[in-house]
Amino acid sequence: MILKFYKSPGLKCGQLAKKINSVSRVADVVADLESEICYYIEAETAFDKNEVEIIKWILTSPFERDELKDKSLFENEDSKKTVLIEIGPRLNFSTPFSSNAVSICKSVHLDKVKRIEVSTRYLVRLKSVVDNTTENEIVNALHDRMTECRYLSPIETFDHGFRPEEWFEVDVMTKGRKALEDVNSKLGLAFDNWDLDFYTDLFRSKLKRNPTSVECFDLAQSNSEHSRHWFFKGRMIIDGEEKKESLIDMIIETQSTSNQNNVIKFSDNSSAIEGFEVTGLRPNETHAPSNFKLEKMKQHLIFTAETHNFPTGVAPFR
């Protein structure tokens, strides 16, 4: 079962205006926006009155105990002059918020709670009637398509209907490299020609067996350039002559002449440049509880460039 609570306001007016004004055509048809937050709480069985109060206590600020409502504030709005757009996380992944919230529920013996997700509901007041194309542009301006999606109706279950595909054997022994080419295309493994030749020889000539689809997927992840840095950190041989430095060393070295403002160069996906003298809070003692003091210090600027957009998509619960 799913229990729902609503809270208003969601995003502030300035944030909403910024989202909408990023698309000029949308800004021309939108008169105003309001928003509210919706909590979806999934449980194995129905909640009793005491359990509902505990859930509300977990989800609300101590200073705003009555902010959660059982009904949406937008229920009685005129649908001819408005459009209600609900944006929430994609249902095939539990969010970090859900993981933390469910852990809190378990710590107070609400073991029946399985998942808690938060959506934002936007009430868009229109200057004129809009077609589906314009409505979709409004939706696109309001959410991140990588991690979120539109809910066309309130969520009644987190069961999205998708089921994991059964693993299968890749028939390298009979079909050779063509079998790996097919699974490469089917699963989007990004094997290059070198990979295809290497794995064909590995399984057909040395291991003398077929790989499974799971093995191929694992090889694509763990043996990829992203994980192993074959090209960036490997030996560089150009026109038969081995270079003293790897490709990544050559790239890092460019920063010695192109940017004299560096403090850290390419350290664990991060770099730092010279910062400024600032005043910050620092504890009097770092090894025990103590008062804080104002202290002047030089604070450098850190730049991080991490390429893991959503790594938990491979095995989110392992």
Image (spheres, grey):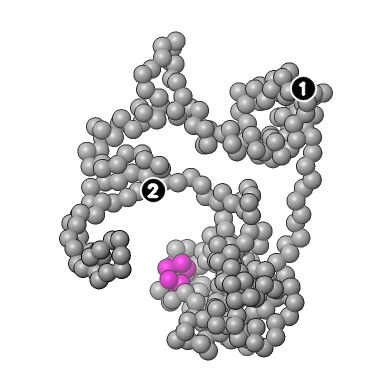
User: Left or right of 13: which side holds 123?
Assistant: right
Identify the image quadrant of residue 296: bottom left
Say which label, 2 or 1, has the lower sequence index.
Answer: 1
Dot 1 corresponds to which residue? 208
**Res 311 visible:** yes
Callout 2 crowding tier (Cα within 10 Å): few <14, some 14–19, many ≥20: few
Q: CA distance from mark 2 to mark 1?
A: 44 Å
Comparing labels 2 and 1, the label whose residue is closer to the camera = 1
Tell me the amino acid under the disc marked 1. Answer: Lys
Q: Position of residue 295 (x, y in %)?
A: 18, 63
Q: What residue lies at 41% left-to-right and 11% top-to-bottom?
A: 241
The chief SS type of the magenta part is helix
Residue type pointed to by label 2? Thr
Say above or below: 307 vs 183: below
**Helix, strand or loop for disc 1:** loop
Local secondary structure at mark 2 = strand
Q: Is residue 18 magenta?
A: yes
- Report the front residue among 24 and 254: 254
Quadrant the N terminus occupies: bottom right
Which range is magenta? 15-21
Q: Residue at x 46, y 72 (%)?
A: 16
Q: Residue at x 64, y 75 (%)?
A: 109
Q: Is residue 180 magenta?
A: no
Give the image location of residue 70, x and y in percent: 63, 86
Question: Foreground: 105 or 233?
Answer: 105
Question: Label 2: which residue?
Answer: 304
* Badge number at residue 169: none
Residue shown at 73%/37% (left/top)? 213
